[in-house]
Amino acid sequence: MTEITDDIEAVVEDTDLPRRLKEDVYDTIEAREGVDTENANYIAKAVEAQYKGSRVDPLDPVGTVSAQSIGEPGTQMTMNTFHYAGVAEIDVTQGLPRLIELVDARKNPDTPMMTVHLEDEYATNRERAHEVVWNIEATKILALGDISTNVADMIVSIDLNEDTLAERWPTVESTTEIAGEIADTVQDNLGVQVTQNGTVIEFGPEEPSYRELLQLVEQLREITFKGIEDISRVVIRKEETEEGEEFVLYTEGSAFKKTLKIEGVDASRTTCNNIHEVHKTLGIEAAREAIIDETMTTLEEQGLDDVNIRHLMLVADIMTNDGTIQSIGRHGISGNKDSVLARAAFEVTVNHLLDAAIYGEADDLDGVIENVIVGKPVRLGTGDVDLRMGTTSD
C-alpha cells in the first residue's frame, strides 16, 4: 500500500480532473506499492489525457449523432414479444415495441415485471425464499380450494385445501386459524354473513336470488387473500450472481414500492421495468438509471450491443432533466421545443403552424431541423464557424 503524501496529493490536485476521477486516482495509487511522486504524476496525467480525449468537442451535434446511433440499429429490431432471458415461464415485451414503450414513457408497460433479489438466509434457503414468494404473489380463492354452489339452499361453499394453506401460510401452525382469517376477509369484502366449520366456509345472499348468488361467486374470485394484488405470478430460480449462488424471483406484474417493504427482499438490488414506479419510489435519478438500463438491455437482447451507452444516457438525461419523466413525442420533448418549425416537423404540422401564426411566434433558427427546412447551413460543428481569408503584403 502506498501512503498519499502531500507531494502526491499536490500532483493529483494539479490536474483538470473532476473530483470523482481524482478519488479514483487516489484509490489506484493507494492500491499499488512503492508509487513515488513521479509515478503518481504519470498516472494522473494519463487519466487526464484519456478524460480530455473522451470529452465532446465544442459545437459537436450530440443530439443528431445520438439519434442516428440509436435509430439506425433500431431498424434491425424485431416486432415480437420474447421470453425473458433465462426465464421461459415469463413473457416480456422486447425488441422495437419495448423501445417505443420506453421513449414514449408509457405509464403502464404491456408486460410489467420485477426482478426481486433476496437477502441473508432468504437468498440461500428455498423454504425461506418461498415465504417471500407467497408474500408477493397474489393468492386468489381458486388457488386455495374448491368452490361449489348449492342453488337449492342458496349457499356458496368453499372447501379449503389444508396442504395449500400450510404451504402459503408457513408461519401459521393451525389451518383452522388460517380458514378463520379467510372467512373474515370474505365477510368484509362481500358484506354477507359467513359461517366456518373447520376448513369449510359457507355463505349466501341475504335474500334468495340466483343472480345475486352468481354475483357473489364472481366477486369472490377477485378477492386477494394474501400477497400483492397487481402481481399475478412469481417464478423462483436459483442463479449465479455477484453475491454467489442464490434464489432470484421474477414477477408477472409490478408493485415496486410494496415489494421493497417485504421482509427478505434486498431493496438495493431489486429492479422493476416500469420506469414510472421507479420514479415514484426512488426518485428521478433512479428513474434515469432505469431508462438507461432498460434501453441498453433491450438493444443487447437483439444483438445490438455496439450502441454507445453515452447516447442512451443523453436520451435519459433529456427525458428526466426537469425532474419528471417526459416522453420523446409531441406530448413531451418534441412538442415543447421553442422552435415552431421543429415542432411542426414532428407531428400535427398544420396545428403548430396555425397556432404560431395566431400568436405571432418567432423562430430563431437555432437547431438542426429548422435550418434544414429553410435551407440554411446548420449552426453546429463547422456550420457555426466563420472563416475569413485576408491578404498580407510584404
Image (cartoon, rainbow, N blue to C red):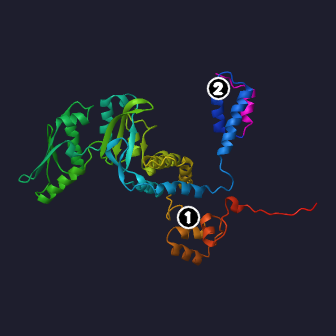
Which residue is located at x 73 percent, y 31 percent? Answer: 41
Q: Amino acid at mark 2?
A: Glu
User: Residue 76 occupies which quadrant of the picture?
Assistant: bottom left
Q: Assess whether residue 223 is covered by the magenta stretch.
A: no
Residue 44 x, y percent position in the rendering: 70, 34
Q: At numbered mark 2, what does the secondary structure look like: helix, strand or loop?
A: helix
Q: Is residue 120 left or right of residue 43?
A: left
Q: Which residues are magenta?
A: 1-15
The answer to whether one can see residue 17 in this image is no
The answer to whether one can see residue 42 in this image is yes
Q: Which residue is mark 2?
A: 30
Q: Which residue is mark 1?
A: 336
Which residue is located at x 64 percent, y 45 percent? Answer: 54
Q: Assess whether residue 4 is covered by the magenta stretch.
A: yes
Which image quarter holds the C terminus?
Answer: bottom right
Q: Residues within 10 Å of mark 1 (few under 14, many from 20)?
A: some
Residue 186 x, y percent position in the rendering: 21, 47
